Image (cartoon, rainbow, N blue to C red):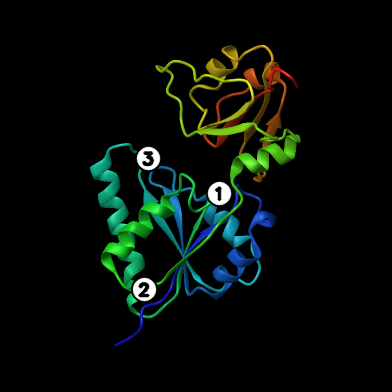
Amino acid sequence: MTALGTFYGVGLGPGDPGLVTLNGLKALQSARHIFTVAGSHTGRSVSRDIVTELPGITAVLHDLPFPMTTEKTQWTENCRRNAETIAAHLRDGEDCAFGTIGDCSSYSTCTYLLDELKHILPELHAVLIPGVNSWSALAAKTQLPLAGIQEILRVVPAHSPDQPAPEFPQGTTTVLLKTYHTRNQLLAQLPPDAQIAYGENLGLPQEYVSTNPDEILSRPEAYLSMLLVKRPNDHD
């Protein structure tokens, strides 16, 4: 009986191929197959674009369609089908990697895919390789400290336009992800002492970064966007 291949979940960072870790690169270089997410409507795969820029990649590349839906049953069924696609190669003893933007354990499709793979192949050997997350990249580009001594870092995955604005307590930095429908609303509701950093398409050719609220407000919305909101402590 052929031994199962190893599954590697690789965080690719926010977009710049230079932010892929050495361990991540080694896993991608050694894999026989590399799988990445493609939008079910656009067919676009940012993850695949990152992988193709890396040196020494000899794997067969596959795009897996994932629908943009919050409907749990549809999402689960699609995830299971994609896991079956990967499992077929793992059963043949071929190592497979799944490359995902950002970190593979932070709001990542990789975690759901791995759960399905473990259900299909209970004896699977899996390795997760963390990646640089987008909010760390944005903080570095704008030199806005994410968190200092006794400050709290908070991450809000998405904010709906019909929800009340999140609170921004003093002594915190709040990461607001997926702001493409709420960015201007959030900017209008910020406390006057808040420091901000905004980023779109980090690490990609169309990257945009700014700390100027007026300039940000004039821009069209972008899907791959995020906002950092920092409020100092009273004694700062």
The residues tagged by marks 2 and 1 sit, at their Cα atoms, a distance apart of 25 Å
Q: Earlier in the sequence, mark 2 or mark 1?
A: 2
Q: Secondary structure at mark 2?
A: helix
Q: Which residue type carries mark 3?
A: Met
Near mark 3 (Cα within 10 A), the count class, few <14, some 14-19 or many ≥20, is few
Q: Secondary structure at mark 1?
A: loop
Residue shown at the point (32%, 36%) measured from the top left: 70
Determine whether, in the image, residue 19 is placed left or right of residue 80. Answer: right
Q: Which residue type carries mark 2?
A: His
Q: Disc 3, disc 2: CB below 8 Å? A: no
The residues tagged by marks 1 and 3 sit, at their Cα atoms, a distance apart of 18 Å
Near mark 2 (Cα within 10 A), the count class, few <14, some 14-19 or many ≥20, is some
User: How many labels were placed on the picture?
Assistant: 3
The residues tagged by marks 3 and 2 sit, at their Cα atoms, a distance apart of 26 Å
Q: Nearer the viewer, residue 195 or 78?
A: 195
Residue matched to label 1: 102
Q: Nearer the viewer, residue 61 or 115?
A: 115
Q: Disc 1, disc 3: CB below 8 Å? A: no
Residue shown at the point (42%, 23%) measured from the top left: 160
Residue shown at the point (49%, 17%) measured from the top left: 165
x then y, percent, for residue 161: 43, 19
Determine whether, in the image, residue 34 is placed left or right of residue 64. Answer: right
In the image, which is nearer the foreground, mark 2 or mark 1? 1
Residue 68's disc number: 3
Residue matched to label 2: 89
